[in-house]
Image: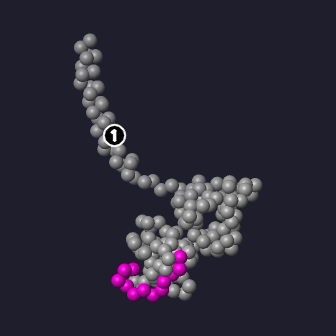
Amino acid sequence: MFKKSVLKEILLPKVILIFFLGSFLFAPVLLFSKEIQKGQVTNLQIPRYVSLKVNEANARRGPSLSHKIDWIYKRKNMPLEIYGEYENWRRVRDFEGFGGWVHYTLLSGIRFVLIKNELLEMRLLPSTEAQVIAKLPQHNIATLDKCTKDWCRITDDGYKGWVPKSGIWGVYKKELKD
């Protein structure tokens, strides 16, 4: 009888205390560590941006030719975001959030961006104080060259310069690119 009460009164509270302290120590690690997801087929990061390699591509409701076509993309180099993979198919969405399943052969890893803002100012250097060298029309597609924390260098219609990340679609907020 004495041993059972000692176990209940002394050992059990210590075990419970250790458990709770341990959970408080490791909870932030589990909650705030964002594990990078990898595609089941390619083992590349999911989601990720790609571009349309061809002038026309069908976006299907499911990952096969037998599925209904929901969208037809008709702009070569259009940036798309891959957020799913199944065999030879990639689940993509465009800047408006629309999309479907596209065969991987129609996609390219070469990065392009879409101009979101009307007459986005392209600057000589990555600064709001830098000289404006061009004003880019909304929905233009530009080649992505490099990105810093807040700016990206792009090429559009023969102009090469810097634009704020907030004015383009096809690059992640915290993405850095050399």
For residue 163, side relative to residue 103 (left or right):
left
Of helix, strand and loop, which one carries label 1?
helix
**Closest to the observer, 4 or 20:** 20
Judged from this view, the residue extending furthest toward the top is: 1
Q: Residues within 10 Å of mark 1 (few under 14, many from 20)?
A: few
Note whether 52 is above or below 154 in the view shown.
above
Q: Is residue 176 above or below residue 15?
A: below
Q: Does residue 44 appear anywhere in the picture?
A: no
Q: Residue at x 67, y 63 (%)?
A: 71
| 48 falls in the magenta region | no
User: What's the magenta bit mostly, secondary-structure-wise?
Assistant: loop
Q: Position of residue 70 (x, y in %)?
A: 68, 59
Determine the residue positioned at 31% across, 44% down: 25
The answer to whether residue 161 shows anywhere in this view is yes
In the displayed structure image, the side of residue 171 where residue 108 appears, left or right: right
Residue 91: give x, y in percent of width and height: 62, 58
Q: Residue at x 32, y 35 (%)?
A: 19
Quadrant of the frame with the N terminus? top left
Residue drawn where x is 31% and y is 42% of the image: 24
- Of all residues, the one furthest to the front in this rendering is 118
Q: Can residue 129 be found in the magenta stretch?
A: yes
Amino acid type of the residue tagged 1 in the rendering: Ser
Report which residue position mark 1 lands on: 23
Q: Which residues are magenta?
A: 126-138
